[in-house]
Amino acid sequence: MSQSPVSYVIVHGAFAPPAKQELMEVAALHACQRTGACYRSLVRCNIPAMPQDFTEDGSSPGVSEEENRNAPSAHEVFAHLRDAFSLGRATVVMWAGMAYRFHEFAEQKRLTNPCSQTRVIDLQMAVVMHLNLKTSHCKDPRNVIRLLNLAPRGDCWSRGSLPFVNAMDVVLGKLIADGWTPELTPAAVTDGPDIGEQAEEMRIERWEQIRERQNNLGIERRPTPDVTPAYIVLDGEHVSTRHDRFSHLIELALVVAYCKERQEPATYELAGKPFSSLVRLQEVENTNPHAWRITGIDPEAVRRAPPLPRVIAGMVAAAPWDRGVLVTWGPDDACVITQNCVKAGIPSPITEVPLIDLQRAFSRFYDLGTQQVGLQNAAAFLGIDTSGLDLHRASADTLVTWHVLDRMLADGWTPQWRPWHRRQSQII
């Protein structure tokens, strides 16, 4: 791989659960070089002592209390990053909202952000924009490696921040080999003191792009009746074909939770028969195989599944759409279902139903900031047992989403809902 004339330094950090406000690990390396300085260090966290190891979160290893006590302070780690990697003269590469999280952490601890005097690249956004991929397919650089069938270099798959930056190095090398420069994706670039504000604006812009796609469908809605709602918890699985970016539904599932009578405060329980069905897709051979590996769905079963109109009819019969509130984990499912219905020439049952984006509500209610928490991590955060469930299948994900919703209601969360085609900032 040829070295870029621009000096790139890849930096990643891991934050200690459950609140993820304390930096616990940092890794960095000089990008696109066969050899060069690699740095990884724990960061001493100011969190209450726990009898067990810190929980693993997918990008950081478990850390014992003793390791935490012996780790250098954030000030020492930041100073080493600035000096060893000459961050004032390099371009820093981070993934997704990591630049914003570093900024917020430094502000909270009254430290000098090591990236505050340099240009920062949001590599996730650069990949999405330059390679014309979906953000949902690029949540992790290792997903991009699998998606593009890239050859990993070094350890990309273990726990911890250093394997994470190794994976980012492979992805950045792919972009540079394809002729990418930061000037080609200006929305993925932020500079110095504006790092926090710029990153937050980019995050909001991503939400707005999703809402704009929904608005373009010309959705109208009637007022929601003033009655006790039923929660319709829905999940869908979808894949994209190689010749277009359209998300084809391959599975739909839902469960319904009704309010128990004469209960104060109101409590809910599942009732009725859960609905679940695969959705026919003929051109399975043209889809990306990564989606099939994640879900475990048999492509041949999808080829023989009922067509979308029949599945939608079954879904309509399974839920009280006239007084229901739709609950999804993230905003994508509602958009994908409606787009598939529009393409199939049938009415979508969800366009007149208010929506709760439970993923966003979860982060706000438990004060986790702006980070998007995966469903499995949310269940672990609340102590919900998911063993025995086939996660990444629609039927299992609806049950886990319901358990998260039920726990949030028990913890005192007050749900509010809005038309799902309005701005994301209005959906709570």
Image (spheres, rainbow, N blue to C red):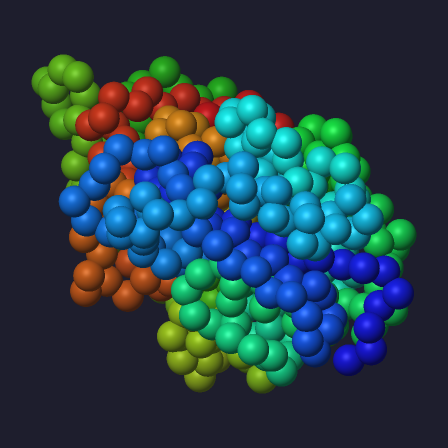
Up-down relation of residue 38 to residue 185 (above or below): below
Q: Quadrant of residue 304?
A: bottom left
Tell me the residue at 53%/32% (across/down): 105
Up-down relation of residue 234 to residue 309 (above or below): above
Tell me the residue at 60%/73% (across/down): 145
Q: Is residue 281 left or right of residue 251?
A: right
> Which quadrant, please, contains the N terminus?
bottom right
Up-down relation of residue 254 to residue 143 (above or below): above
Viewer-nearest residue: 43 or 410: 43
Residue 140's spot in the image, x, y percent? 55, 60
Q: Is residue 231 left or right of residue 385?
A: right
> Which residue is outermost to the left?
262
Residue 191's spot in the image, x, y percent? 79, 38
Residue 338's spot in the image, x, y percent? 56, 48
Residue 314's spot in the image, x, y percent? 36, 55
Q: Is residue 113 visible?
A: yes
Viewer-nearest residue: 391 or 34: 34
